[in-house]
Amino acid sequence: MKKISFVLLVCSTLLLAACSTEKRTEPNDSTVKQEMKVSKTEDATKIAEKKKRAAEAEKKKQEEISKKVLAADTAMKAAEINPTDDTILAAKKAVEAIPGGNNELIKRLETATANLEAIKQQAIVQTQSPQQQIVTEQVQQQATNSDLNFIDEDNNGFDDRSPFNDPAARAEYARGEAEAQRQWEQGQANIQNGVDPNGNELLPGQDHAAGSNPDGTPDAWVQGQLDRITPDGGYQTDEGVIYPE
């Protein structure tokens, strides 16, 4: 009987010890909830900070784009007012520097570039002789024709009906092109300097002085008048030579 009582006492003691240990190892519900709350708060803070940094980065990006658009607009206005190779190139670089591009500025750049080409072509025509102008007009007209109308039986790369099919005509046209380019470059230099190579002041809004080409030589009308002066000091008219009194 004593043995049975001792065994029951030992079992009860072990059972109580196990329950006590289990209670000590079980987490406290309030502690777990508190830790979960802190974790959620930290996650929310991190998300908020991430969103804030993203918003600040986007704001900075948009500010940089706005600055580049403003710079490109300024460059475009300069190119539109005074279309030259330099102003067009500066505008092109400014427009290309805009992240994602800008359709409005791209269209303005295309228009300004086309205007510059038109100005160059007009300058070329103005400095050409009547014969060269006829050749230019014929070439421009042929350029609008379909390739089906292109005839090149001698395989020299030129339409057989084109004035350029004649080597002499091609050489004459090339000389005219080179002279026109030289005059145009001199005109741009004149605009920068405010005078022509002879020191004559330019006409308002022009690249040459009155009665002169950009390089300072007499223009066609003035040269025509000079050509009428005879070696003995007279002036050739349709009715005859006139001498000063």
Image: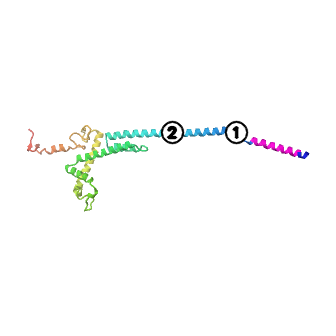
Asked if the magenta segment contains residue 103, the reply would be no
Q: Locate the C terminus and report the quarter of the image it occupies.
A: top left
Check disc 1 and give the amino acid type.
Answer: Asp
Q: Residue at horizontal 15%, vertical 45%? A: 227
Using the rendered view, name the quadrant where residue 10 is placed: top right
User: Which mark lies nearer to you, 1 or 2?
Assistant: 1
In the orientation shown, which residue stands out farthest toward the bottom?
A: 154
Magenta region: 5-24
SS class, disc 2 = helix
Q: Position of residue 220 (x, y in %)?
A: 19, 45
Query: Could you say where residue 177 lies in the image, as x and y percent from the top left?
Result: 26, 50
The mark tally for this picture is 2
Query: What is the secondary structure assignment of the residue under circle 1?
Result: helix
Tag 2 residue: 55
Q: Residue at x 29, y 43 (%)?
A: 188
Q: Which mark is residue 91?
A: none
Q: Is residue 57 left or right of residue 31?
A: left
37 or 53: nearer the eye? Answer: 37
Q: Is mark 1 in CB contact (under 8 Å) with mark 2? A: no
Using residue 123 as the reference point, say whether residue 100 is left or right of it. right
- Label 1 or label 2, whichever comes before in sequence order: 1
Locate residue 113: give its quadrant. top left
Q: Tell me the amino acid under the disc marked 2.
A: Ala
Prevalent SS, magenta region? helix
- Judging by the rendered image, the residue that carries numbered circle 1 is 29
184 to the left or right of 32: left
Q: How was this image coloured?
A: rainbow
**How busy is the neighbourhood of tag 2: few (under 14 within 10 Å), some, or many (20 plus)?**
few
Residue found farthest to the front? 1
